């Protein structure tokens, strides 16, 4: 296919940071295949916009908060995008919700790429995409996105790039300044993210804050480490609670923007995290990760191409959450979400110590 300057592709990335970031390897392959294409991105979360602003493969980003905007204003916004006359639109995997597919249809690209899903496919209006591939429950989200773009001749499923995280010099300088201000420049840093998304009842993915606090105290005692508590403004209260249980000895990362926080994450020797968007950012930074998993299918979202240990309970009922419009729920009336509640501190500590043992110069026990 001959591509000219007018050829336009729209990447529709309306889910959260983690899902959007897991499209970045496919984006890199897309730009390599069609270097002259004008590639735009549509997001509805500020974090997605901030991550992709630094990606040179994206020519323009459109942000619209569909969750908070009224129906008429959202429709008018989408109709304006229709005037761009996109040749191709790509619904980033997973996009198994009817509004995402309706938006793709209204924008009206000649070729609209999307998935056929194994769960509640028809009700999600996936048939509105005219080029589709069947979801594979055994594949990672990154692989699913590359499989999707392969429908237009892009990518080799056997050779997939890393997640793409780009930091500016300003991001790095801001992180260094924060470390200096907090007397942490020469410290061994361990990152925690105790939060998660809240949509679809995903607060149930979160490991107990008291266990995070106990783990932090153990790591400070055994390794003289400094614990950094990461998370957005809506998670500051959670981090304050954890820090109070650590006698105020942790450091809550409160910085003006996400990418300064990302630059600070890169300084950590290991990152301990629930199944969340920051887990995928950590993978993109190639940080060693201990991830604490609940009910999600680990085939979908394990940390991509970085050193990690996953701590999870292999129960007869798990994984029980698949991509559909339904929120997370537990089949058990008693002892609900035991897949996450039964994970103990010593299990996570053991995983952290295994990763730290691989970098002995960074962290020595007392």
Image (spheres, grey):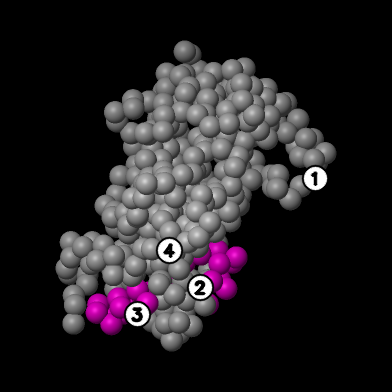
Residue at 42 percent across and 18 percent down: it is 153
Mark nearer the N terminus (3 vs 1):
1
Given the current orientation, which residue lies at the most extreme front position? 333
Which residue position holds label 3? 217
Task: Choose the circle earlier in sequence order: 1 or 4.
Answer: 1
Which element carries disc 4, helix, strand or loop?
A: helix
Q: Can you tell which mark lies on residue 117? A: none
Position of 295 compared to 77: left or right?
Answer: left
Q: What is the span of residues highlighted in magenta in the rendered image?
A: 214-240
97 left or right, relative to 284:
right
User: Could you tell which of marks 4 and 2 lies nearer the N-terminus?
Assistant: 2
The image's mark for residue 341 is 4
Left or right: 202 as drawn, with respect to 99: left
Whole-angstrom CA distance, mark 1 to mark 4, is: 38 Å
Q: Nearer the viewer, residue 288 or 246?
A: 246
Res. 70 mark: 1
Neighbour tally class for label 4: few under 14, some 14-19, many 20 plus, Cα within 10 Å: some
Question: In terms of secondary structure, where does tag 3 sit?
Answer: helix
> What residue appears at the point 33 percent right and 33 percent down from the top-left corner?
160
Residue at image mark 2? 239
Q: Disc 2 to disc 1, how far (Cα)? A: 33 Å
Q: CA distance from mark 3 to mark 1?
A: 46 Å
Q: Is 322 drawn above or below residue 126 in the view shown?
A: below
Q: Secondary structure at mark 1?
A: loop
Tell which tag, 1 or 4, sits nearer the viewer. Answer: 4
In magenta stretch: residue 235: yes
Measured Cα–Cα span from mark 2 to mark 3: 14 Å
Contact between labelled residues 3 and 4, with CB atoms less than 8 Å apart: no
């Amino acid at each position: 296919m001959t591509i000219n300057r007018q050829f336009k592709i729209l990447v529709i990335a309306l889910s959260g940071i983690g899902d959007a970031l897991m499209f970045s390897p496919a984006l890199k392959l897309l730009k390599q295949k069609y270097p002259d294409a004008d590639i735009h991105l549509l997001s509805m979360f500020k974090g997605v916009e901030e991550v992709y602003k630094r990606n040179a493969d994206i020519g323009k980003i459109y942000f619209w908060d569909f969750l908070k905007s009224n129906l008429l204003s959202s429709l008018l916004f989408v109709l304006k995008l229709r005037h761009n006359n996109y040749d191709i639109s790509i619904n980033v995997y997973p996009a198994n919700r009817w509004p995402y597919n309706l938006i793709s249809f209204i924008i009206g690209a000649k070729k609209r790429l999307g998935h056929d899903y194994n769960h509640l496919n028809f009700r999600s209006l996936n048939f509105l995409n005219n080029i589709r591939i069947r979801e594979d429950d055994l594949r990672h989200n990154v692989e699913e996105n590359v499989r999707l773009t392969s429908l237009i001749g892009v990518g080799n499923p056997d050779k997939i790039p890393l997640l793409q995280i780009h930091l500016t010099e300003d991001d790095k300088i801001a992180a260094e300044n924060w470390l200096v201000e907090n007397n942490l420049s020469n410290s061994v840093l361990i990152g925690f993210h105790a939060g998660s998304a809240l949509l679809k009842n995903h607060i149930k993915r979160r490991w107990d804050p008291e266990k995070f606090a106990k783990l932090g105290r153990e790591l400070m005692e055994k390794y003289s480490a400094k614990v950094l508590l990461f998370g957005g403004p809506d998670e500051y209260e959670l981090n304050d609670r954890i820090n109070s249980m650590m006698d105020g000895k942790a450091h809550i990362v409160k910085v003006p923007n996400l990418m300064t926080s990302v630059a600070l994450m890169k300084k950590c020797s290991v990152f301990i995290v629930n199944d969340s968007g920051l887990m995928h950012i950590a993978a993109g930074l190639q940080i060693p990760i201990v991830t604490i998993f609940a009910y999600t299918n680990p085939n979908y979202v394990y940390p991509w191409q970085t050193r990690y240990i996953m701590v999870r309970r292999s129960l007869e009922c798990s994984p029980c959450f698949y991509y559909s419009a339904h929120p997370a729920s537990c089949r058990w009336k008693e002892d609900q979400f035991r897949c996450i509640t039964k994970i103990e501190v010593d299990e996570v500590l053991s995983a952290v110590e295994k990763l730290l043992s691989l970098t002995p110069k960074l962290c020595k026990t007392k």
